[in-house]
Image (cartoon, rainbow, N blue to C red):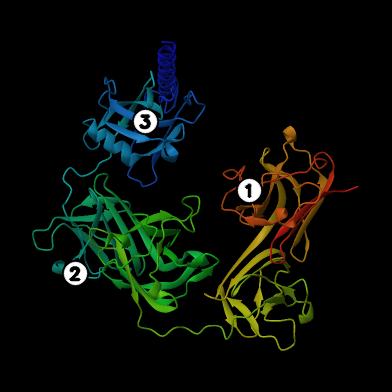
């Protein structure tokens, strides 16, 4: 009997533990508070919407609070005056994909909201807005709302289903049956990449026959009627026409090129062939890395006033694997030149293996339902390579630290086969060149238009400075960056505690008292280029301990990171030994040898 009772007690104990665990492990969503105050625009504000691609209205509100101290996400909701947001007209995420407690909303979007509220083109009416905060599955709508009075733009009540360019200035000439078709990238919007003749006229039509309706461009607006438009000079133009707001944007396209991501440059240009097609060919050489060959690329378009990338629409991360010309793998989309955390690498494709070392043809089509491109083997002859790829590389000449004496030439660091880098001081206006050795019979190389050339040419920089020069013989590319400053960067304080001036031969060194707040011992190194871009140098071996009295030399090895000073605050840092904080300290950073490194030690 006693045995049975013991077994029953054990059974109930086990069940109690199981049910307790189940209860403890139940998912509980994080609560979030509602937004209590709306700041901008103030309630009752009136806005006349304008047909401009850059016109926008700024919205801001008090930040909500999440139970887990995390950052809530935000969504602005709009409704008709008198509504309660149960069935809103429109929703818009705040800036940074909902992470900010503010949003920049374009006039074009507000115009759509006005239309959803029942306002006609040019009509004035009032809408209301509020904010929903969320964290996980929890949401909280603000208990306050603001009124916003808008005057809608004067768009077209009836938008043509298709649009063409015709006239003496166009590729099809004045014969309307040969009018050039526009693409329609989104509803009520038409776009065309085309060649126009300067001083001659063109107009817009919705059909290619005598029954066509006519439109023309007046400044930045579309007008119905048989007026005509001109451009000042011959050129390739991108014309975007939004009939919902009767607006036009005209940009001159100066060039389109194949941007090879590992080289961070255009490796060959594409010529305009007509009908929105650009095409060109050049030699493609993949970049050899320790992990394999890098074959990533995208497109770079230069307008008269800015550069923009064209990258993958679908963010693929593989080679085409036999994809055909019409495959969505090749679809393209425009991106900002500085968009994302790694603009050099974002939204890229990969060349198929057959193109490594081959003449390659790239065709880009800005026409049809989807803008796209295609890569095929080229027909041309491969350009000449430099005579040889040197085993070592040296910097010599009047502008260099070693002067004209080649026996004192400064040696580049070898990063890989045919890839060299040097950190050095150069004198502005004076000449330098590269040499294969420090001997009198050395072969020489120079830089022309950002490329390595073989021979006894010379190179200059405009002004005195400290420069980082990276040379890649595999694709003849050169990247030269002026360094404005180097410093010891404290992770907790997020600032430079000690400047490290350049002292020569690839070495930066500074001495001073290091006094961080909170006595926090985590640090990294910050390099600032002349264009004010920042580069964090952190530990190559990702250590999370103090070095101690007799550290392994590899503890101090450094590598550049992709993080900026804010985003990478705690990653790849070192720690000070005891006795460093508050005392006079010498810090030295050495950009020479097989491993870049640094040292930090007290000074008596």
* SS of the residue under disc 1: loop
Q: Which residue is mark 1?
A: 572
In primary-sequence order, the first of circles 2 and 1 is 2
User: Which residue appears at 13% of the width and 63% of the height?
Assistant: 208
- Is tag 3's residue or tag 2's residue first in the polypeptide sequence? 3
First reached walking from the N terminus: tag 3 or tag 1: 3
Query: What x and y, as percent, mark residue 581?
Result: 80, 40
Mark 3 and mark 2 residues within 8 Å of each other at the beta carbon: no
Relative image position of residue 407 (x, y in whole percent): 78, 80
| Residue that carries the numbered disc 3 in the rendered image | 76
Q: Quadrant of the N terminus?
A: top left
- Which residue is at 39% across, 60% downward? 310
Q: Along the horizontal axis of the image, is 599 left or right of 354?
A: right
Residue at 27% across, 44% down? 245
Give residue 174's mark.
2
Residue 322: which quarter of the image? Answer: bottom left
Mark 2 vs mark 1, CA separation in Å: 64 Å
Q: From the viewer's perspective, is residue 4 above or below residue 175? A: above
Q: Which mark is residue 58?
A: none
Q: Is residue 388 above or below residue 53?
A: below
């Amino acid at each position: 009997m006693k045995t049975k009772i013991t077994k029953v007690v054990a059974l109930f104990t086990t069940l109690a533990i199981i049910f307790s665990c189940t209860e403890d492990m139940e998912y509980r969503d994080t609560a979030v508070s509602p937004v209590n105050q709306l700041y901008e625009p103030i309630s009752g504000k009136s806005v006349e919407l304008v047909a401009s691609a850059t016109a926008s209205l700024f919205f801001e509100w008090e930040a909500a609070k999440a139970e887990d101290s995390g950052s809530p996400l935000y969504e602005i909701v709009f409704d008709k005056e008198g509504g309660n947001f149960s069935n809103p007209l429109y929703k818009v995420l705040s800036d940074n994909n909902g992470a900010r407690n503010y949003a920049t909303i374009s006039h074009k979007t507000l115009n759509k909201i006005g239309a959803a509220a029942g306002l006609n083109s040019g009509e004035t009416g009032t809408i209301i807005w509020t904010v929903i905060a969320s964290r996980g599955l929890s949401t909280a709508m603000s208990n306050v709302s603001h009124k916003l009075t808008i005057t809608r733009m004067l768009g077209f009540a009836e938008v043509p289903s298709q649009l063409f360019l015709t006239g003496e200035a166009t590729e099809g000439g004045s014969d309307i049956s040969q009018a050039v078709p526009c693409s329609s990238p989104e509803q009520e919007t038409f776009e065309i990449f085309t060649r126009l003749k300067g001083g001659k006229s063109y107009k817009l039509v919705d059909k290619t026959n005598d029954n066509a309706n006519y439109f023309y461009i007046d400044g930045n607006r579309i007008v119905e009627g048989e007026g005509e438009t001109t451009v000042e000079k011959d050129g390739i133009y991108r014309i975007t026409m939004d009939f919902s707001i009767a607006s036009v944007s005209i940009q001159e396209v100066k060039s389109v090129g194949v941007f090879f991501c590992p080289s961070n440059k255009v490796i060959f240009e594409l010529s305009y062939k007509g009908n929105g097609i650009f095409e060109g060919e050049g030699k493609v050489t993949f970049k050899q890395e320790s992990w394999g060959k890098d074959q990533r690329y995208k497109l770079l378009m230069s307008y008269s006033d800015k550069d923009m990338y064209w990258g993958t629409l679908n963010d693929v991360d593989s080679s085409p694997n036999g994809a055909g010309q019409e495959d969505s793998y090749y679809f393209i989309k425009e991106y900002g030149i500085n968009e994302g955390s790694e603009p050099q690498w974002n939204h890229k494709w990969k060349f198929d293996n057959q193109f490594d070392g081959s003449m390659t043809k790239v065709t880009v089509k800005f026409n049809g339902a989807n803008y796209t491109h295609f890569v095929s083997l080229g027909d041309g002859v491969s350009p000449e390579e430099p005579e040889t790829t040197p085993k070592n590389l040296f910097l010599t000449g009047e502008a260099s630290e070693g002067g004209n004496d080649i026996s004192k030439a400064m040696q580049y660091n070898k990063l890989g086969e045919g890839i060299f880098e040097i950190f050095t001081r150069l004198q502005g206006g004076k000449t330098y060149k590269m040499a294969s050795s420090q001997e009198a019979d050395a072969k020489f190389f120079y830089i022309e238009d950002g490329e390595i050339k073989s021979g006894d040419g010379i190179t200059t920089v405009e002004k005195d400075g400290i420069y980082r020069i990276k040379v890649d013989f595999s694709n003849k590319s050169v990247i030269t960056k002026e360094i404005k400053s180097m410093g010891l960067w404290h992770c907790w304080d997020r600032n430079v505690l000690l400047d490290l001036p350049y002292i020569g031969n690839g070495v930066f060194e500074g001495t001073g008292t290091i006094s961080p707040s909170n006595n926090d011992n985590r640090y990294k190194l910050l390099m600032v280029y002349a264009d004010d871009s920042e580069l964090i140098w952190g530990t190559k071996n990702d250590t999370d301990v103090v070095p101690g009295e007799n550290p392994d030399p590899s503890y101090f090895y450094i590598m550049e990171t992709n993080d900026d000073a804010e985003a990478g605050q705690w990653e790849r840092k070192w720690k000070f030994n005891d006795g460093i904080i508050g005392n006079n300290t010498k810090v030295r950073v050495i950009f020479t040898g097989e491993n870049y490194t640094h040292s930090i030690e007290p000074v008596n």
